Image: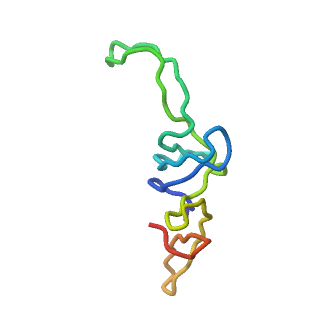
């Protein structure tokens, strides 16, 4: 079971975007994730008339290492760690480590 999933609200713990919050839009390979509005980079793109794409400088999100983000706990308004609790029937649920409440 993954500790971070799509649509989780996370907070950046290190780097130039430290303290910013956003939702995970995609989990990438190699321990990286795309977070909405975080780690924005400028990309110079060529126009493609066959696809109707205009060229120019496009701003988009780049991947950020999962080690540099932490899940945001709305109760405590702080970053938190994720734990996994196994129920009596063997089902697994994700919990916030600080207050043992269930995520989602």
Quarter-of-image position of residue 77:
bottom right
Q: Residue 37 location in percent, x, y?
A: 49, 39
Frontmost residue, 62 versus 77? 77
Question: How many numbered callouts?
Answer: 0
Quarter of the image with the N terminus is bottom right
| Residue that appears at 68% across and 46% down | 14
- Location of residue 8 in the rendering, given as x and y in whole percent from the top left corner: 48, 56
Outermost residue on the bottom side: it is 88
Scheme of colours in the image: rainbow
Whether 76 is drawn above or below 40: the answer is below
Position of the C terminus by quadrant = bottom left
Which residue is at 52% across, 49% downward? 21
Which residue: 67% across, 41% down? 15
State whether residue 63 is above or below residue 58: below
Rendered image quadrant of residue 48: top left
- Give x and y (percent) for residue 73: 53, 63
39 left or right of 91 in image: right
Say which of 102 and 75 sits in front: 75
Q: Is residue 87 left or right of residue 19?
A: left
Residue 40 or 86: which is nearer the viewer?
A: 40
Q: In this rendered view, identify the residue nearer to me: 98 or 64.
A: 98
Q: Look at 58% across and 72% down and name the residue there.
A: 84
């Amino acid at each position: 079971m993954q500790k971070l999933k799509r649509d989780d609200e996370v907070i950046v713990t290190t780097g130039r975007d430290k303290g910013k919050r956003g939702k995970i839009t995609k989990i990438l390979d190699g321990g990286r994730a795309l977070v909405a509005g975080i780690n924005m980079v400028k990309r110079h793109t060529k126009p493609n008339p066959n696809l109707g794409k205009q060229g120019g400088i496009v701003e988009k999100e780049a991947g950020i290492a999962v080690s540099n983000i932490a899940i945001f706990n709305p109760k405590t308004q702080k970053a938190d760690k994720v734990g996994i609790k196994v129920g009596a029937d063997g089902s697994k649920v994700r919990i916030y480590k600080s207050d043992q409440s269930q995520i989602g």
